[in-house]
Amino acid sequence: TTFRDLFYDPACGGGIRGDNGLKAFIPGGASSYWLGPDQLDLALDQDKVGQAGTMLGSGSVVAMDETTCMVRAAWRITRFFAHESCGQCTPCREGSGWLEKVLRRIETGAGRDDDLDLLLDVCDNIAPGLTWPPQQTTICPLGPSIPSSIVSAIRMFRDEFLVHVKEGGCPDG
């Protein structure tokens, strides 16, 4: 079974909402790196997904259609992680707060030219190397899981982030 089967087979997902095109998908919950439509034929197999640089994780697969604002998607996931942080470890406590603050600034139209570099720098301080699997820098795996959505979104949709910074929001409103 592939992600294509999961999304488009009438017995499973039955297609993307509103018959829109698929923009990206999260294969295994908020802590997994995102994949693009070019990965739809990837088997729902732990090893295969791992070779693609991500994981099946919690098994919560999220399809994001072409109308999804990727800045907003990354911000919402980061807000979740910031809320869930117990505050015991500095990388998670401080890092999640900074990431949420910067993403909120970008999403609300007050982004700065250096915000993308700042986001990636903070992510690299939480999970050095920004690769999967992340280095364990905290007592629990929450902290090193935070960067995956931000790094994925910036790597895959950098232009969308730049439009937010330069024009103060989503290109489509």
Image (cartoon, helix red, strand yellow):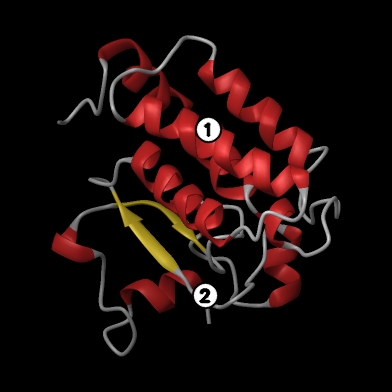
The amino acid type found where label 1 is placed reads Ile
Q: Is residue 75 visible?
A: yes
Question: Could you tell me which quadrant the C terminus lies in?
Answer: top left
Q: Horizontally, is 61 left or right of 68 in the view?
A: right
Which quadrant of the structure image shows residue 129? Answer: top right
Q: Position of residue 144 (x, y in %)?
A: 73, 52
Q: How many marks?
A: 2
Residue at x-position 77% and y-position 34%: 125
Q: Secondary structure at mark 1?
A: helix
Q: 10 Å neighbourhood of mark 2: few (<14), some, or many (≥20)? A: some
Residue linked to disc 2:
2
The amino acid type found where label 2 is placed reads Thr
Q: Position of residue 84 (x, y in %)?
A: 56, 62
Residue sitting nearer the eye, 169 or 90: 90
Q: Position of residue 119 (x, y in %)?
A: 59, 28
Q: Horizontally, is 168 left or right of 158 in the view?
A: left
Residue at x-position 29% and y-position 28%: 108
Residue sitting nearer the eye, 87 or 80: 87
Q: Is residue 53 visible?
A: no
Find the distance from the CA under tag 2 to the CA under tag 1: 25 Å
Choose the circle earlier in sequence order: 2 or 1.
Answer: 2
Q: Is residue 31 above or below residue 151?
A: below
Q: Secondary structure at mark 2?
A: loop
Label 2 or label 1, whichever lies nearer to me, is 1
CB contact under 8 Å: marks 2 and 1: no
Residue at x-position 52% and y-position 75%: 2
Residue linked to disc 1:
154
Q: Is residue 168 above or below residue 52?
A: above
Residue at x-position 30% and y-position 90%: 11
Q: Is residue 172 above or below residue 15?
A: above
Q: 10 Å neighbourhood of mark 1: few (<14), some, or many (≥20)? A: many
